[in-house]
Amino acid sequence: MSDEQTADALGIAIENVEPRAQLAEAQDQCIELAVDAGELQVEMTGYVPGSP
């Protein structure tokens, strides 16, 4: 691989860092939202999915 190709590959990798971090944050927020929704469902209905 030439120096120019290496530099291009490194540039692309660096550009991907911020979107990957944003995606990870969004995924964490989705999980937190799902947990909160489940807790709210239990509070409102007393129903726990998966229980008899």
Image: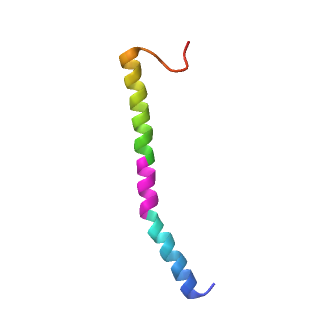
Quarter of the image with the N terminus in it: bottom right
Magenta-colored segment: predominant secondary structure: helix
- The count of marks equals 0
Please report the bounds of the magenta region as a residue range: 18-26
* Residue 24 located within the stretch drawn in magenta: yes
Q: Which residue appears at 43% of the width and 34% of the height?
A: 34
- Is 35 rendered above or below residue 27? above
Write down the quadrant of residue 51 in the picture.
top right
Q: Provide residue 3's location: percent of width, then percent of height.
A: 56, 87
Q: Residue at x 45, y 39 (%)?
A: 31
- Coordinates of residue 29 in the picture (x, y in percent): 40, 43
Residue 26, compared with residue 48, is above or below; it is: below
Q: Residue at x 43, y 44 (%)?
A: 28
- 36 vs 7, left or right, is left
Work out which residue is located at the far right of the displayed protein and give it: 1
In x, y percent, where is residue 30?
42, 41
- Residue at the (45%, 70%) spot, across then down: 15
Residue 36 lies in the magenta-colored region: no
Where, by quadrant of the figure, is residue 43 drawn?
Answer: top left
User: On the rendered image, what quadrant is the C terminus found in?
Assistant: top right
Q: Is residue 38 left or right of residue 52?
A: left
- Judging from the image, the colouring scheme is rainbow
Above/below status of 46 relative to 13 = above
